[in-house]
Image (cartoon, grey):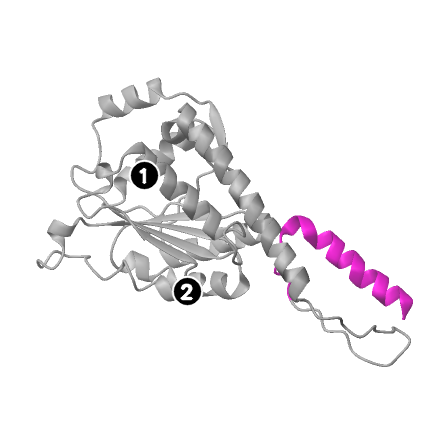
Amino acid sequence: MLCPGSRSTPLALAAGGLARADRLLLTTAIDERSAAFLALGHSTATGRATAVITTSGTAVANLLPALVEADRSCQPLLLLTADRPDRLKDCGANQTVNQEAFLQPACRWVAQGPGEGLHRCGIETLESLVDQAWQRAHQLAGSSAGPVHLNLPLEEPLHASEAEQKQLWASWSPRTIPLAGLTVGDSLTGTAAARNSAARTAAAASEVQEKAQQQLVTQQQPWPELSPAEPGVVVAGPWRGRPEDLPAFQQALREWQSLS
């Protein structure tokens, strides 16, 4: 989900290039508040995090309502917000607010890019950032799924020339590599080291899930056996698990009803 803005131009160009290469389903929305709710609905339907890209300042504040909903309903959501570099903070420049922290209370995880600009990140740092964000937005880091905020300062110039952009995408390979459940292009993970990192991440995520499940079973107390023949009320709240597990949950409810 892309909400256009000046400071987020590099992110918009990257998203547009991936969309043209059929590696990203891109939707453009002018209003950040509406875009965030649309992304939340898409994440709820698919069980996978949908990313929202915004520019700096008030655009970030407009994400808060949907962010709170994602937090309370345990739905994965990725918020990628462009920001000004440190040199443009606290100097009277417009659209500079404390966006690094004011979404944090409703987030599973918040990460800040280099104050000098995202271009200061090496490829390994970017891979780690993507990896951690995906894990923490889903149920791969030992906690429930929910929203994740990546605040990314971007230094000028904010876009390459048309010739430079054409050269970049002409040389970009469409081969993809899975990274902790997410498919991203070679522009981020096209090295053997990245593939090894992805494999280690997937193994670690599986181990975390297994340990969490074992701990849950250990902590569970024996429940009294319920009889559908006895009077009572069964309350089933909204589904908070993975979409692929929902049919089994629904079938269990139907079986219970058939016994009464």
The main secondary structure of the magenta stretch is helix
Q: Is residue 210 visible?
A: yes
Q: Is residue 180 visible?
A: no
Residue under the image location 37 percent in, 34 percent down: 16
Q: How many marks?
A: 2
- Locate residue 41 relative to residue 153 in the image: left or right: right
Residue under the image location 15 percent in, 57 percent down: 94
Return the x and y of residue 47 as percentages of the image width and height: 57, 49
Which residue bears the numbered disc 2?
Answer: 106
Which residue bears the numbered disc 1?
Answer: 125
Front position among marks 1 and 2? 1
Q: Going from the N terminus, do you reach mark 1 or mark 2 first?
A: 2
Along the line of sight, which residue is nearer the eye, 154 or 2? 154
Residue under the image location 68 percent in, 67 percent down: 220
Quadrant in which the C terminus appears: bottom right
Return the x and y of residue 188 as percentages of the image width and height: 37, 31
Along the line of sight, which residue is nearer the eye, 22 or 118? 118
Q: Quadrant of residue 127?
A: top left
Q: Quadrant of residue 36?
A: bottom left
Q: Is residue 54 magenta?
A: no
Q: Secondary structure at mark 2?
A: helix
- How dense is the environment of label 1, judged by Cα within 10 Å: few (below 14), some, or many (20 and up)? few
In magenta, the rendered stretch is 238-260
Q: Residue furthest left?
A: 91
Q: Is residue 255 magenta?
A: yes
Along the line of sight, which residue is nearer the eye, 46 or 16? 46
Residue type at the position of mark 2: Ala
Q: Quadrant of residue 170?
A: top left
